[in-house]
């Protein structure tokens, strides 16, 4: 059994992401994540377990009896939502997930309102949260901070799980979980999530959701990935290296309309100009051909879906919003269900929920 307490940080940090997976598992339930830090922790059986648990929670939450049962599971646990980057959906859906399961919550949404303003390090802040809470759900601009804190907390006298709610330009694993859940639901009655083409479009260089989802899709059979972006914002080499290593078919393109006509799912993303090195860098890139509107809607196959992690700017025209293939609103709500499933699983309540009413 691999344990974070038995490996030095310097050694752990250097491991390939897939090799880190066993160290991040629950010691008593080795197939279940304890810390959730990267998409590389999730294989197909685990994704299917999570989707089944999310479905179960979704149906239970519709009845008073089911909702009260869910709420009775974790009233003895408290979660800290530490978001030092802006968020609407990830923050609120984690908050709602905690409420569904009966956890109480605290939050810091701006480091300027915590003692970090007085010079306290992120590390000391997070150690402080662990004194009062039983889980930390964190979003930060720093790549690797969630991972480092997971190691630190596991080696402290108060080990508690960390959920990475978005780290730097690097990973957004719970977003990728809700994206996969949305794809599984979208194709459930249409032959399943296999033999599909998924097109990513927009700022693929700096979109952390793309890196995480591209990896998760490699768990499914024969999913071709197409990356449509301006040359300056094309998908980074490390994402392609994984696809090459896994023998996944992919293509790079600058022709959205052609890609849409051949796609089962189109995953639009916004330009992430908050990462510009100099203000206005992104505005100098011609992104006009990387928007989904009425013309693209005509080209999308009948059973295709349009997705977006949101927030959007103008990369999906609002005229698409009422088309039955526009999945982004349902995708957003799916975040609440899959995050409820992940939190319940992290605290070891999967079987109890799955057996409800049996
Ligand atoms: N998709 C996503 O991460 O949205 P927020 O930034 O609103 O949380």
Image (tube, helix red, strand yellow):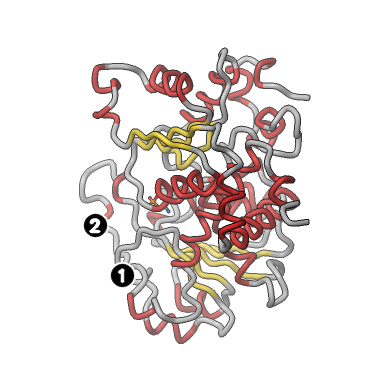
Q: Is residue 139 visible?
A: yes
**Pointer 1 residue:** 288
Picture residue at 57% right of the left edge, 30% below the top: 161
Q: Tell me which numbered mark, 1 or 2, is placed earlier along the sequence.
A: 2
The x, y position of residue 94, in whole percent, is 47, 46
Q: Splitting the image into 4 quarters, where does residue 115 fall?
A: top left
**In front: 54, or 258?**
54
The x, y position of residue 202, in whole percent, is 41, 61
| Residue 78 to residue 68: above or below | above
| Residue 77 to residue 280: above or below | above
**Pointer 2 residue:** 283
Alpha carbons under labels 1 and 2: distance apart: 11 Å
**In front: 336, or 14?**
336
Q: How busy is the neighbourhood of tag 2: few (under 14 within 10 Å), some, or many (20 plus)?
A: few
Question: Dot 2: what SS?
Answer: helix
Picture residue at 30% right of the left edge, 68% below the top: 314
| Residue 67 to residue 319: above or below | above
Q: Is mark 1 within 8 Å of ligand 1?
A: no
The x, y position of residue 1, in whole percent, is 78, 24
Q: Are marks 1 and 2 in contact (CB under 8 Å)?
A: no
The x, y position of residue 284, in whole percent, is 24, 57
**Residue farthest left in this picture:** 279
């Amino acid at each position: 059994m691999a344990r974070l307490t038995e490996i030095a940080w310097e050694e752990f940090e250097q491991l390939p992401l897939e090799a880190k997976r066993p160290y991040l598992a629950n010691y008593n339930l080795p197939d279940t994540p304890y810390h959730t830090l990267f998409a590389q922790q999730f294989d197909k059986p685990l994704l299917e377990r999570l989707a089944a648990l999310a479905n179960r929670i979704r149906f239970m939450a519709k009845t008073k009896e089911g909702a009260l049962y869910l709420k009775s599971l974790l009233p003895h646990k408290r979660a800290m939502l530490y978001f030092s980057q802006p968020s609407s959906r990830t923050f609120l859906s984690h908050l709602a997930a905690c409420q569904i399961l009966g956890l109480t919550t605290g939050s810091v949404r701006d480091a300027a309102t915590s003692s970090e303003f007085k010079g306290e390090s992120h590390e000391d802040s997070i150690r402080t949260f662990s004194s009062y809470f039983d889980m930390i759900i964190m979003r930060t601009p720093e790549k690797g901070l969630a991972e480092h804190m997971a190691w630190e907390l596991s080696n402290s006298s108060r080990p508690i799980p960390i959920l990475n709610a978005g780290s730097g330009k690097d990973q957004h694993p719970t977003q990728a979980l809700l994206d996969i859940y949305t794809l599984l639901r979208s194709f459930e009655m249409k032959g399943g999530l296999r033999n599909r083409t998924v097109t990513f479009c927009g700022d693929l260089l700096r979109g952390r959701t793309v890196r995480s989802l591209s990896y998760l899709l490699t768990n499914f059979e024969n999913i071709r990935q197409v990356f449509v972006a301006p040359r300056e914002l094309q998908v980074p080499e490390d994402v392609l290296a994984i696809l090459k290593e896994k023998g996944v078919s992919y293509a790079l393109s600058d022709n959205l309309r052609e890609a849409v006509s051949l796609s089962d799912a189109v995953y639009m993303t916004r330009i992430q100009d908050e990462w510009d090195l100099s203000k206005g860098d992104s505005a100098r890139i011609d992104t006009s051909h990387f928007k989904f509107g009425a013309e693209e809607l005509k080209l999308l196959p009948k059973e295709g879906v349009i997705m977006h992690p949101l927030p959007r700017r103008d990369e999906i025209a609002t005229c698409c919003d009422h088309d039955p293939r526009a999945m982004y609103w349902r995708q957003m709500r799916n975040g609440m269900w899959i995050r409820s499933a992940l939190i319940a699983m992290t605290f070891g309540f999967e079987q109890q929920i799955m057996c409800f009413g049996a």
